[in-house]
Image (cartoon, rainbow, N blue to C red):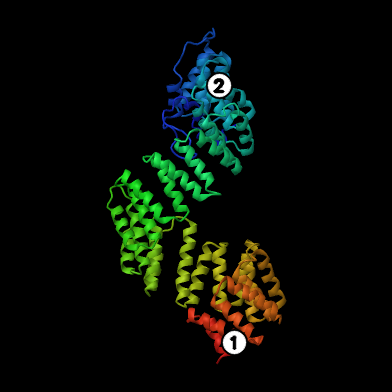
Amino acid sequence: MNFPTRILALPLIFILAACANTPQKSLGDEQAGDASHHDRLEQIAPEAKLDLPDVALTDRLLYEFLLGDIAAQRGRPELAAQAYLDLALTTRDPRVARRAAQLTFEAHQYDQSLEAFKLWQQLEPSSPLARQMLVSLLLSGGKLEEARPHVVEVLAAEPQTGKSFMSLYGLLARVPDKAAALDWLIEIAHPYPDVAEAHWALAQTAITAGKLELALVEANKAYKLKPDWDLAVMLAAQQTQRNDPKHATSMLSDFLRAHPGSHDVRLFYARMLLDQKQYQPAREQFGELLKQRPGNAELAFAIAMISLQMGELDRAELELRQALSSKGSDADTLRFYLGQLYEARKEWPAALQHYSQIKGGDRLYASRLRIAYLQNKQGELKAARKTLEQTEAKDDVQRVQLVMVEAQFLRESDLHAEGFNVLMNGLKRFPEQPELLYQAALQADKLDNHIAFEKLIRKLIKIEPSNAHAYNALGYGWLVRNIRIPEAMALVEKAYQLAPDDAAIIDSMGWGYYRMGQLDKSLEFLRRSYAANPDPEIAAHLGEVLWVKGEREAAQNVWHDSARAHPDNSVLRDVIHKFLP
């Protein structure tokens, strides 16, 4: 069979452990060089004195050799691999077995490669490379028990056992059965209680198996055995953070006092502080990193983003401009965030200027949307629509988004018919896109086009039978029109079962009970909804039910409080005029 997908980029980690001179520098990263598999085999396995078989070179063997070499030269790796594997089985020559192992590996033929490496290891038992490659293949293929005796022997013979355990973790990460991989490694590591790397590998494997308490225990053992090891303290702090974030940061802080030049730990510490929303100390740590690597645009950018998050806009602007002037900086990203900064200041022309300077790259699409948004915000609807029309989308997700944004602009300008047309044109291209169907239905309802509204919503329910908002929209639409109340309530109850904490659906439940004359039940739901989201339309409903129930002062208080916050809401304004003309 062909190699499983997970093995296509097998990095020969276990082989390279004996040759690696530098430790890993990030959590969970696997050691891997840039050399090709062929180069690694050639570099690591120089030919030694071998016990060679006495085999005559027949015409048939010569033909097979030529076939294999020509196939390899002409880009037919599968044919070359099979030819050399057949030769190796026939001649039982370790040199041919080695070549067969190399070719089958490069051809991504897992079963044939495993057969070739087993044969090579059998014919050349003194070759560490043959055994190590066999272990790599067995583990990467999930053949844990078959690999066990080989791993035990390799670990026993390896003077640098720690590096071997680091490599083992990299291979076990590919095993599909994470729990089995963990149990296997626990047994393999049992004879090595004082090897920090063994506990590190156990902790990492426990994380992938979902055994977080074990991961914490093993990570702390690794850190205790090697307190000066950067990977150990980072892993221990990472696991400690789940239950005791303060202690986790203190572990990293203590380590940095003893090892102030540890860039990786400081970066890890800064990110942990950021995750904990400790913005000021996080910025200080990024500042220390920038002192160690002056001119680093990414670090300068991170500092500016923290200042922006803290609301220190002037400082953020200065830091962004300093980052922009740094050699090798990502100018488009920095210009985009400068635009964001000016938006936060409500300085629209300056924001537009920075967005407009972005002419390509990953930030182009987002910058075009921001330009259109700002144009629309300044009353330039025509220009905003033109910007959207000229924006190039890279996939259907973005194409749908452009339709949605244009429809939103039109809706905000009370051009509901035109917005509906935009959405319907979008549905011609994407007839089953759920969000387009939903928004088009709402626009149809706004236009009192009840036939189109119901047709669109029912199509959405058919496509997404668990879409709570679709059931709610159809049921609420009938409740507002005061028709088909039992059916409407059944739809709203279905939505409530699917999303019991959604404030809009809770509001619909309250309004449904109001239509059914159950005022106490209605108030129960409407109060819950208003507490979750003091929306003006929910306030309108709550006030109306209070008024009808005779609690008129409470109703007026709800309406007036909401009107102060939302003076232009038409639904709220209409209900107030209905009861307080």
The answer to which quarter of the image holds residue 518 is bottom right
Dot 2 crowding, Cα within 10 Å, few <14, some 14–19, many 20+: few
Judged left or right of residue 251, residue 324 is left
Judged left or right of residue 419, residue 184 is right
Q: Check whether the beta carbons of the residues at disc 1 and disc 2 lie within 8 A of each other.
A: no
Dot 1 crowding, Cα within 10 Å, few <14, some 14–19, many 20+: few
User: Residue visible at 55% across and 70% down?
Assistant: 440
The amino acid sitting under disc 2 is Ala
What residue is shown with label 1?
553
Q: Answer above or below: position of 492 versus 170.
A: below
Secondary structure category for the residue under label 1: helix
Judged left or right of residue 6, residue 252 is left
Position of residue 269 measured from the top left corner of the image (x, y, whole percent) = 43, 46
Between 554 and 255, the one lying in front of the other is 255
User: Residue visible at 31% across and 68% down?
Assistant: 349
User: Residue visible at 60% across and 82% down?
Assistant: 543
